[in-house]
Amino acid sequence: MREPRILQWVLQNRLVTEDGKRLEFSDHQFLVDPYLDVTPRQVVKKCAQVGWSVMEILKATWLAAHRGLHVAYCVDEETKLLARTGWLSYEELREGDEILTLNPRTRKSHWSVVQE
């Protein structure tokens, strides 16, 4: 079965904004490309509230359901992660590094290997 595209998924599930308004794209064409862009790293400059936070939450949920993403964390680029080799910034972090993570179910920390 083919996975639904994220725009179809949003519309089919009648998802709403934090204000309770149904999401639609006919009057918000400027959001279509960002919704379709699932590159892992994006930089956004915005001059007004355009629904970016809602979009990112929905994209993370869609990726979890359709692409096997299990956990999504939101941190800024200044956040340092504790690796076995010391504190690392996002820029210093490499695939295969082991970082200290928190299991949300058990609330216990453990070392996890960074994957792409």
Image: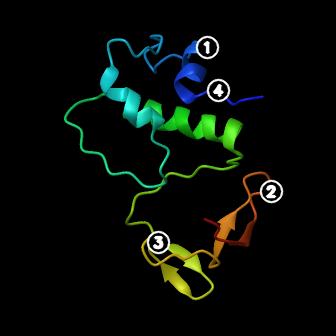
Q: Nearer the viewer, mark 1 or mark 3?
A: 1
Sequence order check: which comes first, mark 4 or mark 1? 4
When the figure is inspected, residue 30 is found, relative to residue 102, above or below; the finding is above
Sequence order check: which comes first, mark 3 or mark 4? 4
- Give the residue type at disc 4: Pro
- Give the residue type at disc 3: Lys
- Callout 2 secondary element: loop
Sequence order check: which comes first, mark 2 or mark 3? 3
Q: Which mark is residue 12?
A: 1
Sequence order check: which comes first, mark 4 or mark 2? 4
Residue situated furthest front in the rendering:
2
Marks 1/3: CA–CA distance: 39 Å
Q: Which mark is residue 106?
A: 2
- Give the residue type at disc 2: Thr
- Callout 4 secondary element: loop
- Give the residue type at disc 1: Gln
Closer to the camera, 52 or 63? 63
